[in-house]
Image (tube, helix red, strand yellow):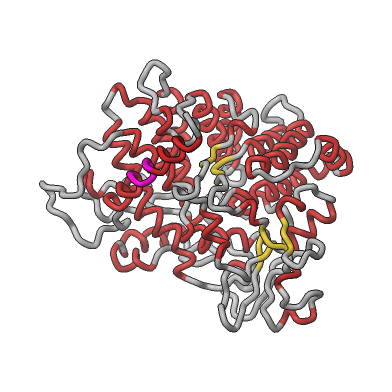
Amino acid sequence: MSKNMKSILFKNKFLVVTLIIIMLTSTACEDELTEINENPNEITNLDYGIQLTNILLSTTEGGYEMFRASLGYCFASIQQLADLESPVSGVFLPGDKYLNDPLFAASLFDEVYTREHKNLADFLHRTKDDEEAVNYHAMGRIWRVMSAHRITDIYGDVPYFNSGKGYIDNNWFPAYDAQEEIYADMLNELEGAVLQLDPNKKNPGTNDIIYNGDLDKWKKLAYSLMLRLGMRLTKVDNGAAEVWVKKAISGGVMTSNDDIAKIIHEIGASRNPFFNGFETRDQVRLSATFVDWMINMNDPRLDMISYVESGGPHKGLPNGYDYETIQDYPGGNDLTTYSNYNPELRKWESPSFRQTYAEVELLLAEAAVYSWHGGDAAEHYEKGVRAAINQFGLFGVELPSDSAIDDYLNNNPFDPAKGLEMIGEQYWAATILVSWEGYSNWRRTGFPVLTPTNYPGNVTNGQILRRLTYSGTEYSLNAENVNAANNRQGPDDFMTRVWWDKE
């Protein structure tokens, strides 16, 4: 098939998916109930494959929540990005200065419960009893975990067990489930979904825009997600963490960059959410913390990540400054002199990552430090760093040579005495392409060690925020349940820690 024909098919598929999104969209807590016995929004003959494509596309995030919640709060708060408060444009990244912007903070919550979870619930309901649809159902279960773990990691207790089921069982006001219970179910779902995958049953093929119907890669993704979630438990339940990490490793995790869970975007069809996130936000720059760390390490990734409009040397923007307070900093408020996110990494057609092989190897290195498997921590660490560098090749940028990567690793050898710190720092660097994950792993490990800012008017007493706040709409439509979550978890503010984030 020609490249032209593939592009046409992809675009036609995307148009169909767009129509489905419009038809399936609703709020987390419907403010107008439909007739119970007659549902005008029900799609009874929707092809499983088309719906699967929609589900996979919708959880790559859109520009709305990407800019507001992911870049605006998560990337900025862990000092991967920074911005200046402009007297004209205001603050683009409230997480840079720990400011309260309720719409930014709630954007992920609003979008997930508007689009993702309703569609996932419908898909899983339609496929669960169809013997020929077992692979569709298993992929849906895995992808629901991908979506659900992201939102519970960001907010804590959230609707999970009954999320998106308004049109299925008339539960329009779902309870907020405890994160501990959500995690237990997500891990069990991953284990069950892998067992359900069956090469003798119908395969979604090209409708699976992640792996093109490759069931072995779906198994690797499920076990890699299990590894990620198992590691998330290290501070709250080390015994359970060990059990699930060992189970994931035994099952078989990702083994190369070919296994990365990613969406390949195309001009005129779906677009990389980073494109929207950066396109009109000309105050956003790479953080000085991030850039200086790479400069000090002589990291070859910096030439691929950083773009300086003036043509000067790589230089990050310090966090916590505005147009006035930056005046004494070298470069002042001339943003053309600071490192921006390379436009080659945020084009419309650039791929978007959901989980990477680099993350997996670095988590295996951490597991080896804990003696949870027989692998060598240094070997996994080096594989993780190599993968994190080489994954930029998927964006079409020129990669450093193998010898340059060898030099980098030789000049920054793995030190067992500082093993967890080095792994945490490399995970932070590797997830500059993976929204949300760097923020969650930083809260779990505390690495890299970051110096908070203390901008006037911040709402965290000068501390890096630990979660985002719920949608204000929930207090109007689902007040009883959101208030029950606050009573159980703690105040709905930026410093309340989620269940797995213990001090």
Residue 324 among those drawn in magenta: no
- Relative image position of residue 327 (x, y in whole percent): 76, 81
Work out whether residue 284 or residue 223 is closer to the camera in this orientation and state it. 284
> From what the image shows, is residue 259 above or below residue 437?
above
Can residue 440 be seen here? The reply is: yes
Q: Residue at x 69, y 67 (%)?
A: 452
The quarter of the rendered structure image containing the C terminus is bottom right
Q: Residue at x 84, y 50 (%)?
A: 298
Work out whether residue 224 or residue 234 is closer to the camera in this orientation and state it. 224
Residue 14 among those drawn in magenta: yes
Q: Residue at x 45, y 48 (%)?
A: 270
On the image, which quarter does residue 488 sit in?
Answer: bottom left
Q: Residue at x 37, y 30 (%)?
A: 136
On the image, which quarter does residue 278 sit in?
Answer: bottom right
Q: Is residue 61 left or right of residue 282?
A: left
On the image, which quarter does residue 127 sit in?
Answer: top left
Work out whether residue 375 or residue 6 is closer to the camera in this orientation and state it. 6
> From what the image shows, is residue 200 above or below residue 88?
above
- Relative image position of residue 502 (x, y in whole percent): 59, 53
Q: Is residue 328 left or right of residue 273?
A: right
> From what the image shows, is residue 117 above or below residue 44?
below
- Relative image position of residue 250 (x, y in whole percent): 59, 23
> From what the image shows, is residue 300 above or below residue 49?
below
Query: In the image, which residues are magenta?
Result: 12-16
How many numbered badges does the structure rendering display? 0
